Image: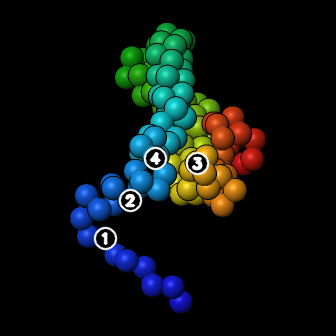
Amino acid sequence: MTSRTVRKNLAPNTIEISVNQGLFAFFRGTNALIYKTVISNTLRFGLYESLFQGLEASKGQFAASVGAATATALVATAVTYPLDLAQGRMAADMTKKSTGVVASAAKPRLYSSVRDCLQQT
């Protein structure tokens, strides 16, 4: 069994991550989160109005509002869930960043981009 040093403060963990993996390790997976947010909000704004107008005449205003919101959230979640999964996997990738001198000793990252992560999934 290997012994692990338990760090109880934020500062030692922050220093260790920045030294071992670089400063960009703190933002790994952020691009997938940005894609997810943009796509989700675009779907919600565009789809809600269309569904609300279509349902309002036949169901009434309250039922149309609830129905349109539910259907919009369902579609947005179904479309953007793979990006949420990619963001989590990219953020959890703890392999060390390969540097010039010890490039052969370090393992490459599991995912090179959001597209690569989605293709491997």
Q: Amino acid at mark 2?
A: Glu
How crowded is the residue under tag 3: few (<14 C-alpha within 10 Å), some, or many (20+)? Answer: few
Q: Earlier in the sequence, mark 1 or mark 2?
A: 1
Label 1 belongs to which residue? 7
CA gap, disc 1 and disc 2 = 10 Å
The answer to whether marks 3 and 1 mark residues whose Cβ atoms lie closer than 8 Å is no
Closest to the camera, between mark 1 and mark 4, is 4
Label 4 belongs to which residue? 22
Residue 88 visible within the image: no
Secondary structure of residue under mark 4: loop
- Which of the pair 60/93 is nearer the observer? 93
Which dot marks residue 16?
2
Q: Amino acid at mark 3?
A: Thr
CA gap, disc 1 and disc 4 = 19 Å
Vertical arrangement, residue 86 with respect to residue 115, above or below:
below
- Which of the pair 47/33 is nearer the observer? 33
